[in-house]
Image (spheres, rainbow, N blue to C red):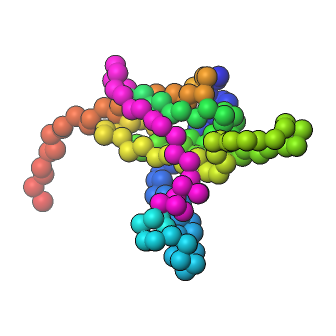
Amino acid sequence: MAKTDIQLRETDTIVEEIDRLHQAISRRAHEFFRNKTNGSPLVDWLTAERELVWKPAVELRTKDGQFEILAAVAGVEPKDLDVQVTPEDVLIKANVDHEHTVEEGTVRMCEFVSGNLFRSVHLPEKIDPNSVKAEYRNGMLRLTAAIAKAAAPRNVEVKAA
């Protein structure tokens, strides 16, 4: 698939997105806590997180001066993927819906997930956000990004005042 099939955006920070998700999980975990649904705050938090977020498996590797991120996002249309990049982070998001209809027959078991796909990857080195390319094939999202070149040291002339 071509790069234009995937929404790719440069952003200043992904902190707001992570904070919004954290607040949603916190609200849901608090509902569990108030209703005494589970046994402990940790169990409440983990249950809320599983209910609200789907975290796809990812792999990060370095090759030829660039990072490559592979994300297993089978079942998600490329047009539904929202990829945000900063010099230090990559954020992959999508809304995933999986529904059953009567015409499809009686469902006996289903492990497909619905909800928010949300995965952030903090990079060990800075990248050039303008160099990021995205490709989707066979359920795998492949992102490549050039590692930013370190600024060369330079001499600064000191002038007498």
Furthest toward the left, the residue is 160
Residue drawn 69% across the image and 41% down it: 109
Q: Which residues are magenta?
A: 46-66
Residue drawn 61% across the image and 51% down it: 116
Number of numbered discs visible in the structure rendering? 0
Indicate yes or no whether the magenta region holds residue 38.
no
Q: Residue 100's x, y, as percent? A: 80, 44
Residue drawn 38% across the image and 45% down it: 122
Furthest toward the front, the residue is 108
Quadrant of the drawing holding the C terminus = bottom left
Furthest toward the top, the residue is 64
**The one of 80 and 64 positioned closer to us in this rendering:** 80
**The one of 119 and 7 positioned closer to us in this rendering:** 119
Residue drawn 54% across the image and 55% down it: 50
Q: Residue 45's x, y, as percent? A: 47, 65
**The one of 74 and 17 positioned closer to us in this rendering:** 74
- Above or below 67: residue 41: below
Does 60 sit left or right of 91 as displayed? left
- Above or below 20: residue 104: above
Q: Residue 42's x, y, as percent? A: 42, 66
